[in-house]
Image: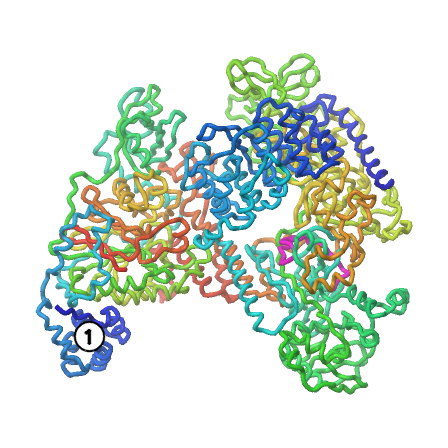
Amino acid sequence: MREEDEEYFGRLEAELDVAMDIASEAKTRGGDPKPEVEIPIARDMADRVENILGIDGVAERVRELEGEMSREEAALELVTDFVEGRVGDYESRDGKIEGAVRTAVALLTEGVVAAPIEGIDRVEINENDDGTEFVAVYYAGPIRSAGGTAQALSVLVADYARSLLDVDEFKPRDDEVERYAEEVGLYDKETGLQYSPKDKETKFITRNCPIMLDGEATGDEEVSGFRDLERIDTNSPRGGMCLVLAEGIALKAPKIKRYTRNLDEVDWPWLDDLMDGTIGDGEAEADGDGDDGDSEDADDEEADADDATDEPVKPEGPPRAEPNKKFLRDLIAGRPVFSHPSEAGGFRLHYGRARNHGNATAGVHPATMHLVDDFLATGTQIKTELPGKAAGVVPVDTIEGPTVRLANGEVRQIDDPAEAIEIRNGVEKVLDIGEYLVNYGEFVENNHPLVPAGYTVEWWVKEFEAAGADVQAMQDDPSVDLADPDPEEALDWATEYDAPLHPNYTCLWHDIDVDEFEALVSAVEDGTVDVDVPTIEHKSVEPSILDVLVLPRSETVREAVEALLLEHTQTDTTLRIPVWRPFVRSLGFEVDGEDLTRTWDELSADARSWPNAVEAVNEVAPFSIRERSPTRVGNRMGRPEKSESRDLSPAVHTLFPIGEAGGSQRDVSAAVKHADSMTDTPGEVEVQVGRRECGECGEHTFKTRCPDCDGHTEPHYECPDCETRLSPDESGRVFCDHCEVEGTSVETRIVDVHAEYRNALESVGERENAFEMLKGVKGLSSKNKTPEPMEKGIFRAKHGVSSFKDGTVRYDMTDLPITAVRASELDVTVDQLQSLGYHEDIHGEPLEHADQLVELKVQDVVLSDGAAEHMLKTADFVDDLLEQYYGLDPYYEVEDREELVGELVFGMAPHTSAATVGRVIGFTSAAVGYAHPFFHAAKRRNCDGDEDCVMLLLDGLLNFSMEYLPDQRGGRMDAPLVMSSRIDPAEIDDEAHNIDVVDEYPLEFYEATRELADPEDVDIEIAEATLGTDREYTDFGHTHDTTDIALGPDLSAYKTLGSMMDKMDAQLELSRKLRAVDETDVAERVIEYHFLPDLIGNLRAFSRQETRCLDCGEKYRRMPLTRECRECGGRVNLTVHEGSVNKYMQTAITVADEFGARDYTKQRLEVLEMKLKSIFEDDTNKQSGIADFM
Amino acid sequence: MLRVVPLEAPARIVRELVRHGYNADREAVTLIASADDPAETLEAVVEATPDDALTITTEQVRRVLSDGKGSNANKAASANSNPSVSTGANRPKDHSETGGDPPETKGDSAGIADASTAFGGGDGADRGDAAHRSIEIANDMTGRSTGTGEYDDFVDVFRDRFERLSNQLRGRVNHRPTDTLEAMGGNSDAAIVGMVNDIRSTASGHWLIELEDTSGTFPCLVMKDREFADLVDELLLDEVIAVEGTLADDGGILFVDSLYFPDVPRTFEPSTADRHVQAALISDVHVGSQEFMEDAWNRFANWLHTEAAESVEYLLIAGDMVEGVGIYPDQDDELDIVDIYDQYEAFAEHLKSIPGDIEIIMIPGNHDAVRLAEPQPGFDEELRDIMSAHDARITSNPSTVTIEGVSVLMYHGVSLDEIIAEFPDEKATYDEPEKPMYHLLKKRHVAPQYGGHMRLAPEEKDYLVIDEVPDIFHTGHVHKLGYGKYRNVLAINSGCWQAQTDFQKSVNIDPDSGYAPIVDLDTLDTTIRKFF
């Protein structure tokens, strides 16, 4: 590790230690459930694994093994340690297996996700029918977060442990085998699996897997056959089991195979049959295709196959990516399509990595964002055609913007966001939506073959250089602009060096056919050059010679010129082209002053038979011409970007129970005054809370600090039957051996909320008018039901923040990557960056100016404006808490957000249980959380629209407690059970290793793209290469800069538009404006996926609905015969009304008409409308028409 | 004897005549069919018939044949003069072959007559004098849907159900309203008539049934060791039952000693027709589906034109005339006819091949273009216009159709799915669809359970209650054939005219396609005819 990296981590950890000391001091004051900080620091993965599992000795052993073998091998090696008792304190065989399995999953998920603790319920040893024993592993839903490989390996580990412990294999009964097949199918239908195994595969796995995969029910649906089996506790699908079987074993068979080979004790020969795919083939034929999703796949494939078989008949065509329309599936109303699959006019693929680019992100020009009516903003998720499935949008203004036709006839490319805003009301058609930047690593990560590159300046420069030009000298020459030469210069270069024509003057010849090409040639022959042009007439073009080519207008010629993206102005009779020389030269004309002379007679047969005009143009032009944009990337909007505080619903200030006394708002001050009847004392509420005992004076209370002597209290457990005092055993279990029941500290008692509230206000010296409302909770769901001290809630309410289920204050942001930043865009000064240890820019120059780019350090994070504001409030809350509750000095003392720079935060993702320490470096107006891709990967996130949260460090340290976590499946997910103080690039999600870190791509790369090569076969350095070296934290090069990381709209129109109807109107409006979008298809899909399911679903819900009492809230499955509420006599009403059933009916019909939906769709709507009328209209009371009165 | 096999199926001739705008007498069609060159004969007949004529009579055909148009007319005529031709006979010869079968022998092939080639034999059917016929329809709510989807509409329906069904039960027990029971004191005997509100099993395996009446609810406990405990298996929510038993010490619960359903009286005697006349009971035609069995349907229609079918004067269709649109996702890929109106047009064409002198009565099903929620009104005007050719009677689902004194309760059968899913296999399966029908008769309600699969449209009364015990109960929907008698009520689930679909294949349902149950209305005996 480099010295500066060591220094960086040293600084972070020193600061962390300071905060830890303060928090530890505060905790010793006894005002919390535990007298110490409850988030242990993990310095490496081994620490995290041990802390998450709570098994002593694991970390040490993991560190020993790590140097010697891979993580997977270490997981298997640990099995012997568990079995032989060297690690873990397990007596029983099932305990040993359980420990080994959990540890394996924890290791394989880098000790970050909750799967090892929440995804594995238990391991049992049960009896086979022949009297032998077998091992059953009980999986739970959260095993999902482990991913397929870890899931599959967990089974292998269990099997290895089983064989070492001499337990026999699982011998399933026939009905169980059948049951598994039905169950996996049902789960796939209800919840969906990434991979849907055929029934035969499922049966084969069940029959052969030596471990019984079991688990708890995760759904309400039940299997119809093979119910009530003796050895399977539930008739509902067991989600954890289904995941492990399908996405684990079935999908990852090759990976498991690799590890079984190394183990003598374990042999899974049946994996070969599974991998050969010979299982289930016969079934596929017989089964037909019941699954809708699959049948669409099959259709796609069929369609593709048709295309493929058609091709040999046609002449050879250019290399192309296969169109893929999967991303259009499940289109949602209000979320527009930006381009249909591989459609001309759609996003043009441009290879490169911008500095704000990484895993699952797509660079889009900010002008495009504005011209798609602001539907795209920084961080908006798009579902995309390739190379992955989804991506987060980042603004990159060094690629080409969109080309539009304006109402005044002008066709121009818009490369300036300000210009985009200025002209957008005048846009008639978006002829081209602009470029789409994707980095090479993205193809590696998705294992997607390379697709033909667009012809860009980067590529051209490489070819120009290869052609013999002294590119270095030209780059140094201030009078030469390689990126943007004059047309004359570009033409000279093309002819002089025999290099392809510069991309700026290369038209999209592949988007017109030979007939159109010939029409253009004729038009040029009939055209004239207008030299009498006094001023520049086309706004975005500054021609070096003021003359204009005037072509006679015909629809064919107009469409062809538009398809070429050649800038021009349309009049009623002509097309006026200001920069025309490269165009007419490309068409094979010689230019001599105003005279244009055609140099050729006939196109060759080859050129004529080519599917587009590229061969033709290359035949007649005096230089070679590359395909400008051969790959178009279809996509549509997925989720909008996010930047908002995480609130429970309803928001909670204090985890203090007040029952129903606070009303639906859970208002504590209302509970204070509440009394059920005249005889009750206001403020006395019956709730369940945990009994605690003061260590000093023995007083019993539910509070964490003794009300008598201020001593710290601990839970006081009793047996519910014999009331004997109990204490937890080593595993934390409380059990009465005498009565053989679980002990508990929970009791139902009257809590005087009034007194609590007054005392809390008084003790912290706050008045009631310091806040609007203090919201508590109805009841506690934690095991010991320990209430949070109300004082904390008072400060949260005062500072306008709310609490998550674990006592922390959180702010959610969409994740986006960034590897280099400039002070100017972060709203910080150079001095501030200097003080954070940034001394040089990316070129090694001293950091002096705010617009110099510096390489981002891995744990530095950029907060959105909203997050900064929220952190400020949280800091004030923490300071008040320190001073007035714990009696310590304030820590943050911040007035402005710039003072937050350098403060530590926790970053933490859903479904994980480990927080990562980050440091605030600056702020952005984009509604996202920018951070180093390694930081995101440490949280096990990529950036395809995922979101996660930040917490202020001291808030987490002071306020988090395991005691508050819900005592239910998944309760420990999303809670910081451990924190990583530094990121080790080798111990993060390896997805982040696939980010390319070069400044430019080699010529061979561009050429390989035209071969549709495997990305692995191309030599471009990715982050993986530097792992374990001194450079592992540095030298993240990028090929593209962007002026600012927050260009384009700050918020997607999806978030600024009001109702769903407004969003959908805007979506359909946009679909008409974009050339690459088929608006009828969009309308059909909106009807099909949104309106019809809504209408049908609501209609169904109406005719089998529940009812509810408006007064007491009591629910009835069916309308009571008493008509009034049986509980309170109140008014009962429907839960689904006519209005909610038919709210989209008219809109759907209008959309179907306006956008020319198929008759089938229209008729479905017609029939539905008739059904609605039949239910909601009285036949005998039809509205009379006016005719009846005449 | 040499059989004269008509070259042209009568049904096709009828269709062809209809295309030209004519109806035809039965015998006229037979005459054309038996001509040596029926096509030519038909053309000649059409030519010879005045444009303003509506019906082609036997006379006209004879005239054309005797005029020598159609070279072999003489032969045809001689074939027709075969002595076996019965011109006015009102008893078909083959009656005996069906009469002997006890209807209880159901389903199995022994009871099935293969009619797939039946049209080949002999001569055309000659149906009796229309004057004997009578059809009355009750419980039709078409055009009388008054519900507007308000809360009170729902309450009114359930109250009406409770009132009408509790009337059936009140005579049998000495019941008390639920709100007066607690006051009766512990250990006293009591009875309740109530709607089943909830059924739960207790920790010790007993059953707790909550019964509801207009004054409240009351818990009733059925001990698991009681001999009638397995009746709990066949309880559905929201049906109305009566229980008798003893109140617990604190009066808070009733220990059930006996349990009653509204049921069909054991003494029930069905009415029968005064003459020998038959009705064909079919359902689930599914025109428009790729799996619609057009050939089987044509054989059926052809058979109806034969003498063997002479007594069949009524055709009852219990729903799902067409495959419909938007019934399940991506259905358009599996439709032969994608346009819903075209589906009904095609269905109407297939109806036209049914002899014009057969009375047709039909109700909609869940694939039809009416609301799914029950009761389902009959088709709207637009669809009626499309299907007007045969002048079929269209009524709502469910309806009671009384034919020459025999009442037939027609119900499409969506609730059968739920009963089969909820009841143990020995009480209801798809293989014996008549068994769940017995349960509906017992409950005197065609679809009691609310809130599950069944959809309810609230109307001013509960049209789904079986007020009067029908003589015949006719359903479809499950595409399985089955029939039998429950306390003398003939229950028939007709099969379908749709071959196995991909979906049915995937869930392993093997439909009974291409059968027509034929019921003798004078004896309520049943014959199953097979047409594939």
User: How far from the left and from the top, in percent, is residue A27?
Assistant: 73, 24
Task: Tell me residue A120's x, y (percent).
Answer: 58, 33
User: As drawn, which residue projects farthest toward the front?
Assistant: A264
Q: Quadrant of residue B225?
A: top left
Instruction: Identify which amino acid the numbered label 1 is placed on.
Output: Ile
Instruction: Residue at 57%, 65% (x, y): give it.
Output: A1079
Q: Which residue is mark 1?
A: B32
Name the quadrant of the N terminus of chain B.
bottom left
Q: Position of residue A465 (x, y in %)?
A: 83, 67
Give the residues drawn in magenta, as a range: A380-400
- Decide: few, some or many residues near mark 1? Use Cα within 10 Å; few <14, some 14-19, many ≥20: many
Q: What chain letter is assigned to the residue under label 1? A: B
Task: Choose top left, top right, bottom left or bottom right for residue B11.
Answer: bottom left
**Residue A1084: x %, y % from top left:** 52, 61
| Residue A389 in magenta stretch | yes
Q: Is residue B241 above or below residue A744?
A: below
SS at badge 1? helix
Q: Is A799 left or right of B497, judged from the image as shown?
A: right
Lateral position of residue B470 relative to residue A117, left or right: left
